[in-house]
Image (cartoon, helix red, strand yellow):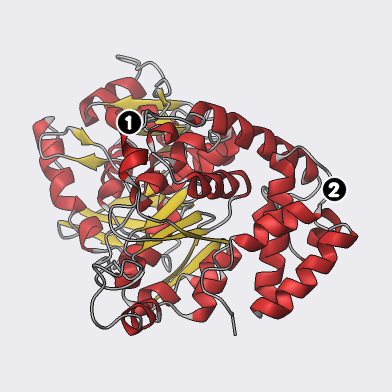
Amino acid sequence: MVSQAHTVAFLGVEARPVEVQCAVTPGMPAFSIVGLPDKAVSEARDRIRAALAAMTIALPSKKITINLAPADLPKEGAHFDLPIALGLLAALDILPRDAVDGAVALGELALDGRLMPVQGALPAAMTAAEDGRSLLCPAASGAEAAWVAACTVIGARSLLELVQHLTGQAPIAASEPGTVDAGDLSRDIAEVRGQERAKRALEIAAAGRHHLLFVGPPGSGKSMLAARLPGILPPLSPAEALETSMIHSIAGLIDAGGISRQRPFREPHHTASQAAIIGGGRRAGPGEISLAHNGVLFLDELPEFPRQVLETLRQPIETGEVMVARANAHVRYPCRFLLAAAANPCRCGHLCDPERACSRAPNCGEEYMARLSGPLMDRFDLRIEVPPVSMFDLERPPEGDSSAVVAARVADARDRQTARFADHPGCRTNADASGTLLDEIAEPDTEGKALLLRAADRLGLSARGYHRVLRVARTIADLDGEDTLRRAHVAEALSFRIVGARED
């Protein structure tokens, strides 16, 4: 007899349905798994044999064949343990076949029959809901999967508990969603002394999702400013929280089933590899740019990153998605992030201080910043020089608006953009607008247009730089609560592109 169970195979953030077919037939005793299994899937037979022995269930002296269909889809991961075990128990008439066939299962088996938590419970629940099935998973993964309200999630601590549930001996209550984490909002922008211009740039970047670059000597507060970005960004919408959580679920970053409404803030070290930043590895997993989806990617010491890594950021910045291509997989991940970066003006960091700069100035600074290509620099909407903080500013009590006040202004600007792009699903912020849509929403008045044309010629703005100035000006107008793009808005937007001079 052939029984069926159901599970999923992960391809990026997508969970592909997989049918587990189990046949127990006469012949030489054997236990084989076919259908492009990887090493972890092939080893499932030993874990299943030990788990069933712990339940005093002995496998028959027959030929057991497990087929994972479709057979041409690679199967990776230990989460195939549970569906294979359930399919086998159904084939042995220990479990009712309709109960096993009506659910999607995933989970790793310990040798004593315990169910170990696995990655990807959230996208698996999405697939189960689309197929009209329930989800069977480890109890530790149930709170995460239960966020999909359309799917009934049964979380069990062991295979024995699940068998008792499916046979009606001891039903298990459906899992409840985990807690909503508000995130750490203790870092207040008011704690930053001085740097009013940099704070203004931070507010503009948060309001329109504009990429920004801080350039300044060590200790001027660049990293401190960037760390305050999450506190002024609006919380994730339900749709955005689901998108982000799907990626984090695949990466195993959801803790105890809790989903955060705070936007992710990722800060990889400058020694990170290309696969770590972009995504890849043997399983073509998500990289830092995808883990920062709908949030912030902060690259400190930007010129210290390998040039090859930095250049691979150019296309994802423009498209909002990345294709990770490997010999056995082509996986697409979303990566719509706000790029914040910080750099010293030169290797020693004191180019602008005549008393501390090295003897190679200014060539030291030119060579150091030349590590950043022109096309990459062109993608930064806001470039801000962050000067050293004076002792006078350090001794003064904190002043300026708190993160809560700034966040309220940012939220108002985001609300205006949400209403503006209601009929344009591909756009959420001003940074996403392009083409005729950008022409419609960011047409300056006569004086603003004349200023922009003169500045474009003087600064040598590329077409991309020209449009990025318009987007920033539109965001500044939104922060001011104005529909018309005025000369003052264009002037302020242009002032943030002076660092780096011409963009030839």
Disc 1, SS: loop
Quick check: 251 left or right of 290?
left
Which residue is painted at 67% across and 39% down in the image? 414
Q: Nearer the viewer, mark 1 or mark 2?
A: 2
Disc 2, SS: loop
Q: Nearer the viewer, residue 475 or 221?
A: 221
Quick check: 240 left or right of 50?
right
Residue 359, percent across and down?
23, 81
Type of the residue with mark 2: Thr
368 w.r.t. 409: above or below: below
Q: Nearer the viewer, residue 136 or 391?
A: 391
Quick check: 371 left or right of 411?
left
The quadrant in which the C terminus is found is bottom right
* Residue annotated with mark 2: 484
Residue 225, percent across and down?
40, 46
Which residue is painted at 74% across and 46% down in the image? 477
* Residue annotated with mark 1: 95
Examine the rendering and report whether any part of residue 436 can be seen: no
